[in-house]
Amino acid sequence: MQLDDQYFMRKALEEAEKAYEIDEVPVGAVIVVNQRIIARAHNLTERLNDVTAHAEMQAITSAANFLGGKYLKGCTLYVTLEPCVMCMGALYWSQLDRIVYAASDPKRGALALGVNPHPKSICMGGVMQEAAADLLQRFFQKKRQ
C-alpha cells in the first residue's frame, strides 16, 4: 500500500499534539524514507530550555543518527508549520528531497521571509493546513487566558 502526504502529515500532527500536551508550541515533524518513518519529533524548546529545540531540528538529528550520516537525501520532512529561518537553514544543509508543511507562518516562516530550501529540495505547503492551524490557535488562545 502506497502511503500519501496526508497519512504522514497526520503522524506529524500526532507529534504536535504531544507538544501541546506538555505546553510546548504545538509543532510536530516526521521524516520519511521509502515510505518508512525514521524520525518523529515535536517542539521541546521549553522542556530543554533551548531555543534551537524546534521539531524540525530534533527530527533532523534523529534521522541523521538513524541513517548514520548528515545528509538526508531521499527523505521527506513532514512538519505542521512552515519552517522558520533557522530550521530552513538546517534543512538546506541536510539536503532533503522534499519538505511538506501544513500551516503557513506569514510572520516568521522562512518562505514568507524569502529564505528558500536547497535547490534540489521540493517544498510544498497546505497539506492538512486547517488541522495544524486549529491546534496552534487553540494553544495560543489558551495562553492568552
Image: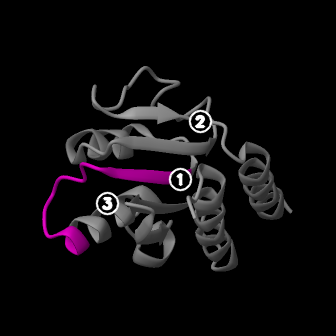
Identify the amino acid type marked 3. Answer: Ile
Q: Which residue does the numbered mark 3 point to in the structure image?
A: 60
The range drawn in magenta is 65-79
Relative to 45, 34 lies left or right: left
* Outermost residue toward the right in this view: 145
At which x and y percent is residue 142?
82, 64
Say which quarter of the image contains residue 120: top left
The kind of secondary structure element at disc 1 is: strand
- Residue 63 seen: yes
Q: Nearer the viewer, residue 145 or 47?
A: 47
Q: Which residue does the numbered mark 1 point to in the structure image?
A: 79
Say which quarter of the image contains residue 31: bottom left
Q: Any magenta on residue 73?
A: yes
Query: Label for residue 125?
Result: 2
Identify the amino acid type marked 2. Answer: Gly
Residue positioned 24% across, 42% down in the render: 95
Whole-number angstrom distance, CA of label 3 to CA of label 1: 11 Å
Up-down relation of residue 29 to residue 107 (above or below)? below
Crowd class of label 3 (few under 14; some 14 to 19; many from 20; radius 10 Å): many
Q: Nearer the viewer, residue 6 or 80?
A: 6
Say which quarter of the image contains residue 116: top left
Q: Total number of numbered labels?
A: 3
